[in-house]
Image (cartoon, rainbow, N blue to C red):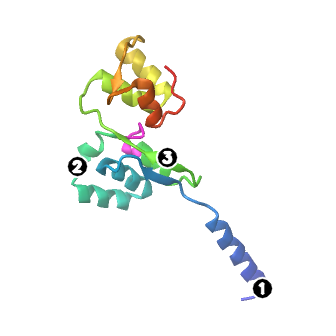
Amino acid sequence: MNKKTFALLATLSLGATSVHAVNLVSGDNSNLTAMCIAAATSDDAMDAKAKEYGFSKAELESFSCNGMTLNEFAKKYRDDTSGQAVVVYTFENTGDNRESELCIAAATSNEAYKEAKQRLFGGKVGQVACNGLSIDKFAKRYGNRGFKM
């Protein structure tokens, strides 16, 4: 190998090591959050984790990862090379009610909150508690740091 070829290979390998994948950190240590992180890694990792935890396809479609479906979350973070740390939370609307849906939307984004507020409450929302927190504290704690009512 001549010196020019070696220099090119060294440059390519140094460039490759400077790109870092997004760092997904579990915010609640739940099996559902582990599924989100596995899905963002690869299809094989997601399939293995689903098998390990015994999740059916329907169950995998019933919760959200940081306010996104499992597939949306995987698509967003699978190829992310930003190197940023992202705290991952899962939301499951177990109460199947409009207040829970509004809380999840508030934690997702201001746009999702406004849309859910209009669709579910006609734009007028009274006091809503989300897991014992005010809706603004819940939204800010679980991902929407810039939440505005």
Point out which mark residue 3 bears. Answer: 1
Q: Which residues are magenta?
A: 65-71
Along the line of sight, which residue is nearer the eye, 121 or 103?
103
Q: Residues within 10 Å of mark 3 (few under 14, many from 20)?
A: few
The answer to whether mark 1 and mark 3 are in CB contact below 8 A is: no
* Secondary structure of the residue carrying numbered label 3: helix
Distance between the alpha carbons at the discs numbered 1 and 2: 55 Å
Q: Is residue 108 left or right of residue 21?
A: left
74 is higher (above) or lower (below) than 145: below
Residue located 34% across and 50% down the image: 29
Q: Position of residue 41 (x, y in %)?
A: 43, 57
* Secondary structure of the residue carrying numbered label 1: helix
Of callouts 1 and 2, the N-terminal one:
1
Q: Position of residue 119 (x, y in %)?
A: 38, 17
User: Which amino acid is tagged 2?
Assistant: Ser
Q: Quadrant of residue 141?
A: top left
Point out which mark residue 56 bears. Answer: 2
Q: Residues within 10 Å of mark 2 (few under 14, many from 20)?
A: few
* Secondary structure of the residue carrying numbered label 2: loop
Read off the residue under disc 3. Answer: 76
User: Which amino acid is tagged 1?
Assistant: Lys
Along the line of sight, which residue is nearer the eye, 98 or 61?
98
Residue located 46% across and 20% down the image: 114
How many numbered circles are shown? 3
Of callouts 1 and 3, the N-terminal one:
1
Residue located 36% across and 14% down the image: 121
